[in-house]
Amino acid sequence: MDTFQVVVLALIQGLTEFLPISSSAHLILPAQLLDWQDQGLTFDVAVNTGSLLAVVIYFRHELWSMFTAWTGSVATRKQTQESKLAWWIILATIPAVVVGFTAKGFIETHLRNIEVIAFTTIVFGLLLWWADKMTREGFTEFQVGWKKALVIGVAQAMALIPGTSRSGATITAALMLGLSREAAARFSFLMSVPVSLGAAILVVKDLVESGQSIDMHALALGTVISFVSAYLCIHYFLKIISRMGMTPFVIYRLALGAVLCGVLFL
């Protein structure tokens, strides 16, 4: 990749990873629409690491409180609201792990195409719109409970289909279950940490086994751009949804889906 492609793809990863518009779809589309060469496993590691670092640093205080409370609950079996939240995040991660291991090959072989992305972009955009319109000031992330956490985890597993959007699916499910917009977004962001870490480990494993060469310039540049853009995205997304809700992202999804349908049928 040249520097322009590195910048574009890193920005796409950073800006779309935590918005409900599907980062995987946006990373697939440049290669299919612009005939760019696939960015490869090395670059995937870099940009995913950048966005993972962004959410970890942004929520560092919450994550540390959850971690210390969780380890304390394991040792003493006494639960706090932070330790319960940590357990719910762990539970919500399980469906994605199961589906990822069992269906990864099928998804990569049969579902990484414009037809699927166009369909999921529109359908899950409409579901997000419906969930957002039905929402009221509801539960916080500390009131989720294990049943709701498991349902949101199933939604996260469905987001392995390109175009669905991990954050979009989890926020949609959380809104349907009665969480407020801000709580739904925070729970979704916290859920991304174990999933992103696990995905990065698997990609590194694949990278080592493939023997693929490493472009250190692209690696460093992609990581930094992805980190900065993802951090800013998280910050401003949480501010926007409290005033505007999910409507701007729904409009974007429907517009993108219409464009992709036009590409398919013209």
Image: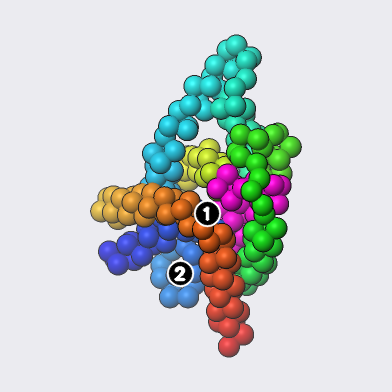
Q: Residues within 10 Å of mark 1 (few under 14, many from 20)?
A: few
- Quadrant in which the C terminus is drawn: bottom right
Q: Position of residue 110 (x, y in %)?
A: 64, 63
Q: Residue at x 27, y 64 (%)?
A: 3
What is the count of numbered marks? 2
Query: From which residue to which does the magenta span run?
Result: 161-184
Q: Position of residue 2 (x, y in %)?
A: 29, 65
- Which mark lies nearer to you, 2 or 1? 1
Where is mark 2, residue-wise? Answer: 31
User: Of 20 and 217, which appears nearest the observer?
Assistant: 20
SS at badge 2: helix
User: For the view shown, which residue lies furthest in the bottom direction?
Assistant: 266
Question: In the picture shown, does residue 211 fall above or below 117?
Answer: above
User: For the view shown, which residue lies furthest in the left direction?
Assistant: 217
Q: Quadrant of residue 80?
A: top right
Verify CB contact (< 8 Å) between mark 2 and mark 1.
Answer: no
User: For the view shown, which residue lies furthest in the top direction?
Assistant: 76
Q: Is residue 188 magenta?
A: no
User: Of 151 and 143, which appears nearest the observer?
Assistant: 143
- Quadrant in which the N terminus is drawn: bottom left
Per the picture, the main secondary structure of the magenta-coloured stretch is helix
What is the three-letter code of the residue carrying label 1? Answer: Ser
Where is mark 1, residue-wise? Answer: 242
Dot placed on the residue nearer the N-terminal end, 2 or 1: 2
SS at badge 1: helix
